Image (cartoon, rainbow, N blue to C red):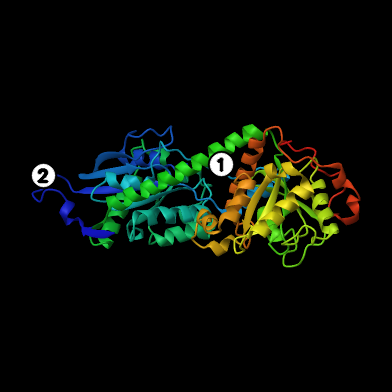
Amino acid sequence: MAAVSSASDTGDPRGRHPPERRLLLLGGPRSGKTSTANTILGDEVFDGGTETTHSNVGHTEIYGRRVTVVDTPPWAIPADPDDDAEADNNDNAGAESDSPPRPPPSLDSEGPCMGAILCPPGPHAILLVVSVTQPFTETERRAAEEQLGALGGGTWRYSMVLFTGIDKLPKGVFIEEHIANTGEALQWLVERCGSRYHAFDNTRKETEENTQVPELMEKVEEMITDNQGWYFEVNELILLEEEQARRALEEERMRMEEHARQREQMIGGPPRELRLLLLGWKGVGKSSVGNCILGRRYFESGQETELCLRRQALVSGRRITIVDTPGWDWFSVRRTPKRIRQESQRGAALLRPGPHTLLLVLPVVSSLTARKRRTLVAHIETLFGDSACLHTMVLFSCGDWLGRTPIEEHILRGGRELQRLLEYCGNYYHVLDSKTPGKDRSVSVLLDKIEEMIRENGDKAFLPIQTEWLSEESSYSSDNTEPEDDCRGCQLQ
């Protein structure tokens, strides 16, 4: 950011043109930006009946001074991981959120910062429009901070909070009292703007005694004086790069939304359920992987699993049922005790009418020899049959060890045996960092891959339970549910 003296843009030195003031309006959804822009311009220049998708510019003259006003699309409200977790809990309890849904992203719209290009060489004042009728929480505060940061450094000295809807305040309540009572997020915003703020009642713009626009311009002039006549100089190259990055993120979000819509059509109505069986050697982190997928510590990690354990949680809009199993021997099926082999089968029996996916947990830090690969395949086929490979996915644990190395590069370095194992599993694989349960965004991607596998398997969506798996089932298995509390209501059968 560079600040340039406004002496260069005060018009013709002989006074042929009035000096100009340029105002950039930024704000969140339903903040009243467009109505505020029309109030300043003194006319219905912009359409206030529809959501603004592209920045628009209008001009007027106030007390002999040319004023340029730029209205912008609403800034995006950033997603909060804690909000997502709370939303999952609300869905699980059948509750509805009080906060309005965020508008879906659209490639037809542009980012609000692009409006700064429409008032070259840059705005004298950046008006952050906040409606007193909308809650201003920490999430909105972060959105405002991100937008100002996207414009470049030094923007706060040119910023002012412009409150709208003050006619909706209770009788006798002034804007100062509203700021004090709303909370720390709003107080932070006002203080960050140098305690500069103004209040608008956009329903008064037709009245003769309306002085709110001249008063706003007086405060703008005071800010310009405090800034020694400088304005915020816009770096168009930086803004264009920011816009390209924003559109790339929106394309990815739209792709994920389309994928979710297709998944909804495939699965049908709620509850949408996935039944997963964790398998693998001893000490590979199966319990930690289960905790990572379910989002909390359901399984005891760090100690050897002796009995199958079934747990269930709502994850990314799906009801996930996972069974953790004891580990196998690394080098031989025969060296895996019979009791452990039976536990693996009984674990599958806990997922009636059968598991959708056998998650074969494999640490990224372990090397795979031919003997180890043959042992894994022998365990799967001996315990679950030759068709089990259709329902098996390799799940790499300890993903944090990869650092910045893509999993595909790790697979190439892993050698032919690792590639042969993946081919056996239909090249279905995923990688998780199981150290941070509930915070790994790739869990949702994993569930998408599992549903893709289910879709590919067609009428064989899950691995059916065999009669021999049910023998003496209650002798070894441990569960926190009654025997009749099974998965017969699943929509993916």
365 to 457, vertically: above or below: below
Amino acid under disc 2:
Arg
Residue under numbered circle 1: 101
Q: Position of residue 27 (x, y in %)?
A: 42, 47
The answer to whether residue 71 is left or right of residue 390 is left
Q: Closest to the observer: 290 or 11?
A: 290
Residue under numbered circle 2: 16
Task: Tell me the SS state at disc 2.
Answer: loop
The CA distance from mark 2 to mark 1 is: 51 Å
Total marks drawn? 2
Q: Closest to the observer: 75 or 261?
A: 261
Which residue corresponds to the image point at 75% horizontal and 63% vertical from the top-left? Answer: 300
Amino acid under disc 1:
Pro
Q: Are marks 2 and 1 in contact (CB under 8 Å)?
A: no
Tag 1: Cα neighbours inside 10 Å, few (<14), some, or many (≥20)? Answer: few
Q: Closest to the observer: 4 or 490?
A: 490
The answer to whether residue 356 is left or right of residue 340 is left
